[in-house]
Image: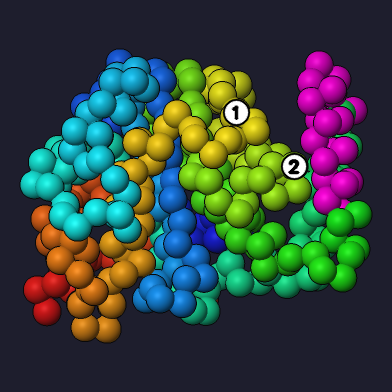
Amino acid sequence: MQKIFECLESTVNKSILEKFQNFLKQYPDVDKWFMCSDYCIGDKNKKNDVITFVIYPYILNFDDWKKVINNLQKKDLKHTRLVSDQFCQFLNQGYCFSFSFILQKKNYFDGWKRKEAGDMLIQTYINLTENWQINTPSNAENYKEMNKKLQKLRNESRKKNFNYSLFGRMMTICFLAGYLRYLLLREQKNIKLFSWLSDRDAITNWNDEIYQTFYHIISHCIIASEQGEEYHRIQEVYLENIKEEIFYDEMNRVADYICGTFADFDYTDGSVTGDKQCKMMEDAISSNNYIIGISVEEKGVAQICHSKILRE
């Protein structure tokens, strides 16, 4: 994981970081933040596999955020025919900031789908949570509960039908979410409260929501390694037992539109399949400093400049 972390850092800590810092400067006193996410992976009708995260400042309560986004776009991308001018303007005005990771057919995270890598990661985190129970007795019960879930997952992995591909997908999403949590903590000095609100997906209910355990451990390790005691500055609100109707569907709609457009976009010729994706690409994504596209390749990552692709 250290290698991909370093690759992300070398790419993000250039022009992307400047854009992200300029976004954060608009909210110097906001100490509560949340992140929504959407995924398009393994859809044979789409050009790309995409993981999208959208970071919001808690400048409105959730009911007000829902009203704002509902007034702009009432339905998800696949259920709508038109993208409004107002929605595109909203995305260009810096009320939120998004990172989209476009996974190439051969990419760095493919290795996590293999049985050997999956078994090693599970055992590594079992060992970590056992050590943490000893080293941090004040939080031993929490780590003990994590360890139980990981032990259960290890037992499941010994079955012939264990889904290592889904495990690798979960690890990829959790690692990227953990990295962005670290990035926000590093750059927003007064942050106190944070929550990752994932879209309903195969990973969220898989094996007793084990993704939350991996996300917690990964983000803990990244932040503790890079920032030490700064880890204790941020409190995270975790959601459990995500139901069919969840309170943040509207906020997640922004990630849905961005993710769906990137998934549809053909990077070989700059084409899309419909007017709504064309509208999103031209009016919301191209030349937008608040929407970042990152290509995840076999040996690392690279920023994508969509305005250049569209011009060509």
- The residue sitting at 31% across, 64% down in the picture is 262
Residue type at mark 1 is: Tyr
Reply yes or no: does residue 144 show up in magenta. yes
In the displayed structure, would residue 12 be above or below residue 95?
A: below
Q: Residue at x 39, y 73 (%)?
A: 46
Q: Quadrant of the C terminus?
A: bottom left
Q: Is the image coloured rainbow, by chain, by secondary structure, or in one colour?
A: rainbow
Q: Which residue is mark 1?
A: 238
Residue 148 vs residue 14: left or right? right
Magenta stretch, residue numbers? 134-154
Q: x, y percentage for residue 9?
A: 45, 53
> Where is 195 relative to 126, above or below?
above
Q: Which of 112/44 is in front?
A: 44
**Spot occupied by residue 83 in the image (x, y as percentages of width and height):** 16, 52
Dot 1: element: loop
Left or right, 124 with respect to 26, comes to: right
Mark 1 packing: few (<14 Cα in 10 Å), some, or many (20+)?
A: few
Tell me where residue 251 appears, x and y as whole percent.
Answer: 35, 36
Tag shown at residue 208: 2
Q: Main secondary structure of the magenta part?
A: helix
Q: Position of residue 13 (x, y in %)?
A: 36, 50
Name the quadrant containing residue 59.
top left
Q: Nearer the viewer, residue 167 or 83?
A: 83
